[in-house]
Amino acid sequence: MILHSSLGPNPRLVRMFLAEKGLAEGRDFQRKHYDIITGENRQDASYIAKNPLGAMPTLELGDGTCLTESWPICEYLEERFPNPNLIGTSAEEDAEVRKWCRLIDQEIVVPMTMGFRATGGRPMFEPRMRVLSEAAGAEMMDYANASWLWLDKALGDKAHVAAGRMTLACLMVYCFANFGFTVGWTLPDGANNIARFLDAHKDRPSAGIWTQSE
Ligand SMILES: N[C@@H](CCC(=O)N[C@@H](CS)C(=O)NCC(=O)O)C(=O)O
């Protein structure tokens, strides 16, 4: 397998997922890095042939099949490499983990990334995709911050988001908070449970991806 990867939370989510599965770069998969700051991912015709949207990441399988979208890539990896389980061990647990993934995606990931693209990320993103107005971007960031506080309340004093253990839902929270930190965002005041959660997970090997240079 080849992971076509770059800076940013979506490739890093897949890299964290691979690390949590015990799959090692160089041994179990190769990683090809693209410079998204200069837009290499949208200029390289061979990459566009693999992922017509030009976004990162893409997982290329041995037979040339290319999988895109970080969450479905993780679902594929879960089926191929079931241990340790990261999405659910029963129909009920699957539904619980997927519920949190869906809520985090919809209420935090989408407003946060759209908000960033329309505010601090505007110089990078405006030439390459449709972005919201500055005012709408700021509203998106406010929306995401309110969702972080809602998630903080839902997390309470628990160590994990769903199923009482590390799952894809925990990795999404870790990734998108750390994405925020890399672009100057800070947790909204009062998100103390999320702060504790991030601190508790920061020494896992998979979290090391956030401290490595690409
Ligand atoms: N929905 C996609 C989002 C992909 C995405 O936005 N990737 C970012 C990196 S985190 C990217 O490629 N940004 C540079 C660009 O769009 O040119 C997924 O789940 O993978």
Image (spheres, rainbow, N blue to C red):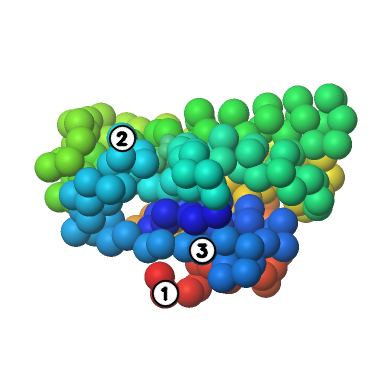
Taking the spot 77% from the left edge, 30% from the top edge, the residue there is 94
Where residue 199 appears, as percent x and y from the top left, is 65, 65
Vertical placement of residue 72 versus 13, above or below: above
Q: Quadrant of ligand 1?
A: top left
- Mark 2 lies on residue: 52
What residue type is disc 2 on?
Answer: Pro
Can you tell me whether the CB of the residue at mark 1 lies under 8 Å from the nearest atom of ligand 1? no
Report the mark closest to the observer, 3 or 1.
3
For mark 3, does the 10 Å Cα neighbourhood hold few (<14), some (14 to 19), or many (20 or more) residues?
A: some
Compute the Cα span from label 2 to label 3.
21 Å
For mark 2, does the 10 Å Cα neighbourhood hold few (<14), some (14 to 19), or many (20 or more) residues?
A: few
Q: Secondary structure at mark 2?
A: loop
Taking the spot 82% from the left edge, 31% from the top edge, the residue there is 93
Residue 93 seen anywhere in this rendered image of the structure: yes
For mark 1, does the 10 Å Cα neighbourhood hold few (<14), some (14 to 19), or many (20 or more) residues?
A: few
Where residue 107 appears, as percent x and y from the top left, is 51, 30
Where residue 210 appears, as percent x and y from the top left, is 51, 66
Compute the Cα span from label 3 to label 1.
17 Å
Label located before the other in sequence (3 or 1): 3
Q: Is residue 10 left or right of residue 18?
A: left
Label located before the other in sequence (1 or 2): 2
Q: Secondary structure at mark 1?
A: loop
Q: Is residue 112 left or right of residue 119?
A: right
> Observer-nearest residue: 203 or 184?
203
What residue type is disc 3 on?
Answer: Gln
Can you tell me whether the CB of the residue at mark 3 lies under 8 Å from the nearest atom of ligand 1? no
Taking the spot 49% from the left edge, 39% from the top edge, the residue there is 65
Q: Is residue 119 left or right of residue 90?
A: left
> Observer-nearest residue: 23 or 140?
23
Q: Secondary structure at mark 3?
A: strand
Which mark is on residue 213?
Answer: 1
